[in-house]
Amino acid sequence: GYRSRSAYKLKQLDREAGLFGQGNTVVDLGAAPGGWLQVAVERVGDEGTVLGVDLQRVKDVEGAETIRGDMTDEEVRADLVERVGEADVVISDMAPNMTGEYGLDHARSVHLARMAYETALELLAPGGDLAVKVFEGPDLADLREEMEGEFEYVRAVHPDASRDSSSELYLVAKGRLTAPVREGD
Ligand code: SAM
């Protein structure tokens, strides 16, 4: 079994959007407790590479490596980029601690999604894909529009498994248009 119900959301995203291929390098942001890592390891196979990052320690997942760190920390992001080099797929299920205050939770979620997007721009090979969780709200349109400039297309997907928290969706950006842009380039 999988460690999280989220695993089924990722399987649905993969079915609908074709995220993973055998041998891919996958970076999973907000990876704890590790359900998405389990799915990614299955999908990329023995030749693949899966690396997760989370604020929390992640119990070992066979076939994956993990880094404990805060993706809002520039140093953590730089270390990640250096360690991975180039990735085929970046996935982010990062979510803020919910306060119950809608506007605040939305803004924090968009900030985390933006961190994932900016990291993806430094990591993704041409043709690479990004799937990122975000809570619905007014700041979403700007982020989506920016993403549309960097990928062939962007879709919003509401997985069946997240129906109970209906403000959550995933932006799936397919086909990175250019090569990674590194800070300092
Ligand atoms: N996809 C995971 C799975 O299938 O097991 C579940 C991820 S859970 C919904 C969201 C995770 O995002 C939490 O483990 C949380 O610690 C992490 N997170 C939130 N903010 C973060 C940040 N700034 N940097 C790294 N991880 C973060």
Image: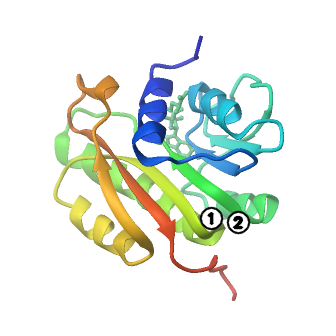
Taking depth in this image into account, of 74 and 3 the one nearest to the observer is: 3
Query: Are discs 2 and 1 less than 8 Å apart at CB?
Result: yes
Callout 1: few (<14), some (14-19), or many (20+) C-alpha neighbours within 10 Å? Answer: few
Please state if 124 lies on the left or on the right of 46 as rendered: left
* Occupied quadrant, residue 152: bottom left
Q: Which mark is residue 74?
A: 1
Q: Amino acid at mark 1?
A: Glu
Query: Residue 64: percent from the left, percent from the top?
Result: 76, 35
Q: Secondary structure at mark 1?
A: helix
Please name the residue shown 59% across and 10% down the image: 1
Asked whether the viewer can see residue 95, the reply is: no
Give the percent coordinates (x, y) of residue 102. 18, 41
Where's residue 99, x and y in %?
Answer: 28, 34
> In the rendered view, would you say 108 is above or below 152?
above
Instruction: Please tell me in which quadrant of the rendered image residue 111 appears.
Output: bottom left
Q: Nearer the viewer, mark 2 or mark 1?
A: 2
Measured in 3D between alpha carbons, the distance from the residue under mark 2 to the one under mark 1, in whole angstroms, is 6 Å
Q: Amino acid at mark 2?
A: Ala
Find disc 2 in the rendering and name its residue. Answer: 78
Label 2, secondary structure: give it: helix
Picture residue at 44% right of the left edge, 75% below the top: 150
Residue visible at 29% across and 27% down in the picture: 160
Residue positioned 45% across, 61% down in the render: 174
Reply above or below: 113 against 146: above
